Image (cartoon, rainbow, N blue to C red):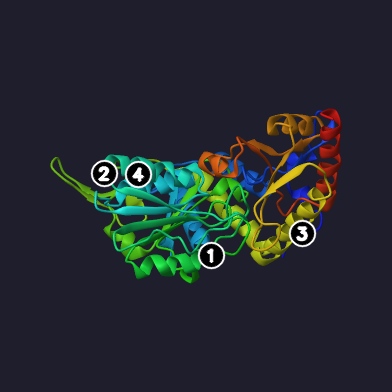
Amino acid sequence: MKQLLDLKKDFPILNEKVNGKPLVYLDNSATSQKPQEVINSITEYYTKYNSNVHRAVHTLGEKATLKYEEAHEKVANFINASKEEVIFTRNTTESINLLAHSLQISKSDNIVITDMEHHSNLIPWQQICKKTGAELRFIPIDKEGKLNLKQIPIDNNTKVVSVVHISNVLGIINPVKELAKLAHQYGALFIVDAAQSVPHIKVDVKDLDADFMAFSGHKMLAPTGIGVLYGKKRLLQKLPPFLTGGGMISNVTKDASKWADIPNKFEAGTPNVSGAIALGVAVDYLQNIGMDEINKNVKELVSYLMKRLLELNNISIYGPENGDRTALVSFNLLNIHPHDVAEILDKEGIAIRAGHMCAKPLMDILGVNAVCRASPYFYNTKEDIDHLIESLKKVQEVFK
């Protein structure tokens, strides 16, 4: 088991300096950094056994295929699924688009999402509703930013309920297990956007009873360009493919094609082999630490971050001060644009996110155009947060 103490040494980029200052990376909700083990796995693939998968009978092709299939197995075990229920995509966005285009949505249906969704779990449904005439409905949030569970607009015509697990703006952990139960009572499919949750907490798809779940590798130590769509076997078997072409067929004639078994049916064309293998290595790394340990560490860092931020004057913090939140804190300094805050912090070597966080409807509800977001991960320390707070004080002095 890896120990959380001094894990920074595993991440080469954290030894870098930015503007002459040691890098303090607090933008992990956008993308996490990569440990040397993951980087080495990519180099090894391209220098030792670079080949396409599922097509060759030579040694390189067989090894690449074995490693690629092992990656499916590792991810499946990580979320308590079966190997055939794990589909590799580019990212969460592509996973949800796959569902939006493959599920049979009709004019009489409605789709329920929430007021706090990332654009990845809003725009695909928005566009499908415009195309089909279906209705898009929203679960509202209360003053703390939590879902108002007394106003869930679900009925017998609801085809899909698609909900973010952890908000990328509010850091709130939504009660997806309860929402799944409610969706199933109305015969609706339940989808979880787990982009922020899978990197931070133990996620068990069987316990949640999610019909589908989407997440991205790059937020959990893996490279960009590799994502996951989980789906229950019986549903994936019935679902038509989103993309067609090479690698996803079992037979083709001039007149017709027969699809391959899952998950290959949904993995058309040459996949991101190196990315998938690296995702498997990232999963190994996370499991060697333990997701319970990671969750405990990140929650402690977020609690400490909240405590230190509340010491500042003229600050607004979004989401509940206490309770079910983790991963990140979004805030604004009075009369200082988030982009100005981020730019000055960058001069101190600190990386945070500033902007609308791909959640513009939520920004409208919060009454702001943009926010600052600090998102620690397990390789961050309280000293990193202390440096952030002292630098935020400098920002306020500059704009005093």
Q: Give the percent coordinates (x, y) of residue 291.
A: 65, 63
Task: Kindly check if marks 4 and 3 are in contact, taking CB atoms under 8 A apart as contact.
Answer: no
Task: Kindly check if marks 4 and 2 are in contact, taking CB atoms under 8 A apart as contact.
Answer: no
Could you tell me how far apart the alpha carbons at marks 4 and 3 are, in whole angstroms? 39 Å
Give whichever of 258, 87 is nearer the camera: 87
Q: Is residue 162 visible?
A: yes
Secondary structure of the residue carrying tag 1 is loop
Kindly identify which residue carries mark 4: 268
Kind of residue indicated by mark 1: Pro
Q: Nearer the viewer, mark 3 or mark 1?
A: 1
Kind of residue indicated by mark 4: Ala
Kindly identify which residue carries mark 2: 132
Kind of residue indicated by mark 2: Thr
Kind of residue indicated by mark 3: Leu
Kindly identify which residue carries mark 3: 4
Question: Which tag, 4 or 3, sits closer to the chain's start?
Answer: 3
Residue 175: assigned label: 1
Question: Which tag, 1 or 4, sits closer to the chain's start?
Answer: 1
To which quarter of the image does residue 299 belong? bottom right
Q: Nearer the viewer, mark 1 or mark 4?
A: 1
